[in-house]
Image (tube, rainbow, N blue to C red):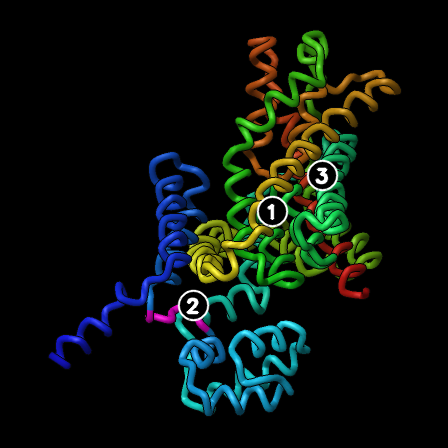
């Protein structure tokens, strides 16, 4: 009988909590969206599967050594940790003390747990290497740079302003999160508000990079929101675009783009990096990797490296990045009122960014001889190339011969640059406070 009882107690099903059950369903939903609906499958599939692995009871695949110690509930070990943190030997009190502790103290407690015989789970290790260090988003940005053509932006530099205007959604969302906190609706700190705001840039790697730096506890919700809304761009943007433009404006035909020389394409990433990094060093990691990837593409002398970055390397890193994000899809971090606020603010951020880009295009038309079709302003959010395709699709609805895709790629690429710069601004000023 005792053997049977021990067998039953060893089953994960016997330890399945309500929160874990809900998160397993959320993870299955993400897998369904990735497979059946093809919503950003390259990220949502590994994120969803990582969520499944993270919520298997007693497996501890997403737990750090310290979290495993706390889950074990050994009174003697809890007393040792509590004494180091000057708090009561209670799991809840220890977690609160750790949340307020300096990173150096948290690292000491993690090492102490390792000394006591606990080891981090495989997903926790993935997270530490891929996101905790910031490596994975940076490598993906390098790959994005290697796949990016700056030609449309260089051929029509005015579109840089459209990409810049679309970043207004980021800062508006930061204010929105702080407003929710001010009125006591949902509690958000300034670093959390900044991390949520970057969703408005429609740039998944940037959102993950900034969240890992400013609000790792919200990373799962922010990443899921960012990639889900990126997949929903064809549904979110068109109503806003039609509401802010007239039929006449949607029919505007733009002049043919000039041919951009190879020299311009080679010089641009170097000049861009030097100008931005010298003024805003905190933007250098993201923008530096992006420009390096683009330089490999445009130089034409390292085709093997460029091909590797565009294909093999970015694919491998995407797998580990997705699983690492899935490690944060655990009940105590995801099933919070903050998650609802993140989802709400995320869609508002997309809407504001789209509207700001369209309105900036209309403003430029007031003082310009060569008119810009306002529809390409919505491509200023950096969902590449989906936002540009949406601009083209809505334009074709009004004029079947008006192809806006290449024109829209200008603000689309500018949006990637803008989101990286916005992330640098957040890091510089939020961490300084």
Check the image and report above or below for 134 versus 394. below
Badge 3, how many Cα within 10 Å: few under 14, some, many 20+?
many
Q: What residue sits right under mark 3 in the picture?
A: 169
Q: What residue sits right under mark 2 in the picture?
A: 62
**Please, what secondary structure does the residue beneath circle 3 have?**
helix
Q: What residue sits right under mark 1 in the picture?
A: 342
Residue 338: percent from the left, percent from the top? 60, 51
Q: Nearer the viewer, residue 380 or 340?
A: 340
Name which residue lies at 59% across and 91% down: 83
- Quarter of the picture holding the C terminus: bottom right
**Please, what secondary structure does the residue beneath circle 1 have?**
helix
**Please, what secondary structure does the residue beneath circle 2 have?**
loop
Residue 86: percent from the left, percent from the top? 64, 87
Residue 337: percent from the left, percent from the top? 58, 51
Which of the 4 quarters of the picture holds residue 213?
Answer: bottom right
Based on the picture, tell me whether residue 59 belongs to the magenta stretch.
yes
Residue 269: percent from the left, percent from the top? 70, 49
Q: Do we see residue 118 in this rendering?
A: yes
Badge 2, how many Cα within 10 Å: few under 14, some, many 20+?
many
Give whichever of discs 3 and 1 has the lower sequence position: 3
Based on the picture, tell me whether residue 184 belongs to the magenta stretch.
no
Give whichever of discs 1 and 2 has the lower sequence position: 2
Q: Left or right of 90: which side holds 122?
A: left
Q: CA distance from mark 1 to mark 2?
A: 22 Å
Residue range of the region highlighted in magenta in the rendering: 58-63
Q: CA distance from mark 3 to mark 1?
A: 14 Å
């Amino acid at each position: 009988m005792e053997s049977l009882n021990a067998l039953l107690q060893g089953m994960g099903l016997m330890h399945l909590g309500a929160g874990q059950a809900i998160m397993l369903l959320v993870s299955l939903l993400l897998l369904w969206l990735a497979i059946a609906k093809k919503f950003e499958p390259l990220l949502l599939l590994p994120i969803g599967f990582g969520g499944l692995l993270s919520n298997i009871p007693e497996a501890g695949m997403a737990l750090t050594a310290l979290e495993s110690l706390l889950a074990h509930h050994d009174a003697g070990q809890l007393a040792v940790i509590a004494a180091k943190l000057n708090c009561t030997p209670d799991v809840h009190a220890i977690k609160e003390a750790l949340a307020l502790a300096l990173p150096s103290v948290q690292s000491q407690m993690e090492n102490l747990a390792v000394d006591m015989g606990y080891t981090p789970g495989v997903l926790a290790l993935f997270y530490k290497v891929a996101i905790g260090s910031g490596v994975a988003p940076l490598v993906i940005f390098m790959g994005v740079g290697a796949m990016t053509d700056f030609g449309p932006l260089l051929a029509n530099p005015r579109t840089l302003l459209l990409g810049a205007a679309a970043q207004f959604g980021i800062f508006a969302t930061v204010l929105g999160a702080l407003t929710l906190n001010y009125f006591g609706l949902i509690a958000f700190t300034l670093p959390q508000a900044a991390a949520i705001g970057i969703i408005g840039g429609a740039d998944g790697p940037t959102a993950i990079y900034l969240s890992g730096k400013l609000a790792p506890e919200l990373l799962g919700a922010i990443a899921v929101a960012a990639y889900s809304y990126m997949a929903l761009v064809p549904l979110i943007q068109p109503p806003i675009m039609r509401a802010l433009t007239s039929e006449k404006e949607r029919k505007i035909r733009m002049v043919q783009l000039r041919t951009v020389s190879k020299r311009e394409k080679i010089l641009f990433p170097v000049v861009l990096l030097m100008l931005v990094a010298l003024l805003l060093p905190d933007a250098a990691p993201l923008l530096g990797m992006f420009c390096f990837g683009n330089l490999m593409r445009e130089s034409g002398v390292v085709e093997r490296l460029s091909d590797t970055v565009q294909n093999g390397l970015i694919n491998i890193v995407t797998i580990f990045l997705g699983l690492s994000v899935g490690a944060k899809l655990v009940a105590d971090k995801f099933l919070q009122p903050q998650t609802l606020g993140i989802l709400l603010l995320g869609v508002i951020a997309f809407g504001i960014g789209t509207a700001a880009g369209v309105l900036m295009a209309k403003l430029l038309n007031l003082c310009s001889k060569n008119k810009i079709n306002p529809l390409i302003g919505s491509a200023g959010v950096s969902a590449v190339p989906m936002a540009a395709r949406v601009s083209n699709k809505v334009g074709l609805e009004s004029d079947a011969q008006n192809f806006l895709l290449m024109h829209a790629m200008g603000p689309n690429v500018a949006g990637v640059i803008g989101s990286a710069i916005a992330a640098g601004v957040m890091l510089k000023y939020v961490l300084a406070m």
